[in-house]
Image: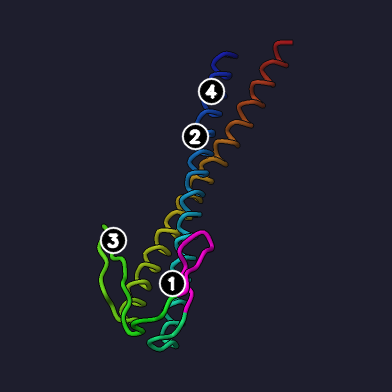
Amino acid sequence: MKMDRREEIQGIMMEAENYRRHIESLKGEMQLLEATMKELNASLAALDALKENKKGASMLVPIGSGSFVKAELKDSEKVIVGMGAGISLEKSIEEAKAVLGERGKEIAQAMEKLQKNALEVSEVLMQLEDSYRRSVSALQSEQQQKK
């Protein structure tokens, strides 16, 4: 019976480790979504700022890695919006904000689902940890009874 209890404990430990890895994976996905949401909010703010500028205004355009290029605004009415799958369309600022707003809602829903999933996995992990403690305690009791 002692070996069976040890196998049970080992199985619980392996299952708990799988759940811990799953939680870490979910956290990684959440971080990616949070970064995407942050970028989206920055884009919405940039669109609002763009409305305040007129054609010919001088501006700094980000090119990545905290670097910028000086540019002159050619059109303050239309922007190019990535629609996915490598497709971009010209939209008015308000249309672009609507597209980005919808993306924001989708990201928020995905984040909510991930949080719910992480909570469910955490609950299962807590149950496994409780089962582990009970099994270890039972094994210790069995060992003491044999002495």
Q: Earlier in the sequence, mark 4 or mark 2?
A: 4
Q: Earlier in the sequence, mark 4 or mark 3?
A: 4
Query: Which one is closest to the eye, mark 4 or mark 3?
Result: 3
Q: Estimate the spatial distance between the alpha carbons at disc 4 and disc 1, rounded to whole Å.
A: 53 Å
Mark 2 lies on residue: 18
Dot 1 alpha-carbon crowd within 10 angstroms: few under 14, some 14 to 19, many 20 or more:
some
Please say whether residue 68 is one of the residues in the magenta stretch.
yes
Asked whether the beta carbons under mark 2 and mark 1 sit within 8 Å of each other, the answer is no
Q: Secondary structure at mark 4?
A: helix
Amino acid type, residue under disc 2 in the picture: Asn
Of residues 140 and 70, the one drawn nearer to the viewer in this rendering: 70
Asked whether the beta carbons under mark 3 and mark 2 sit within 8 Å of each other, the answer is no
Q: Earlier in the sequence, mark 2 or mark 1?
A: 2
Which of the 4 quarters of the picture holds residue 145?
A: top right
Q: Earlier in the sequence, mark 1 or mark 3?
A: 1
What range of the chain is rendered magenta? 59-70
Q: Secondary structure at mark 1?
A: helix
Dot 3 alpha-carbon crowd within 10 angstroms: few under 14, some 14 to 19, many 20 or more:
few
Q: Earlier in the sequence, mark 4 or mark 1?
A: 4
- The picture places residue 35, in percent across and down from the top left corner, at 49, 60
Mark 3 lies on residue: 84
Q: Is residue 115 left or right of residue 105?
A: right
Please say whether residue 56 is one of the residues in the magenta stretch.
no
Q: Estimate the spatial distance between the alpha carbons at disc 1 and disc 3, rounded to whole Å.
A: 16 Å
Q: Estimate the spatial distance between the alpha carbons at disc 4 and disc 3, rounded to whole Å.
A: 48 Å
Q: Secondary structure at mark 2?
A: helix
Mark 4 lies on residue: 8
Residue drawn 64% across the image and 21% down it: 139
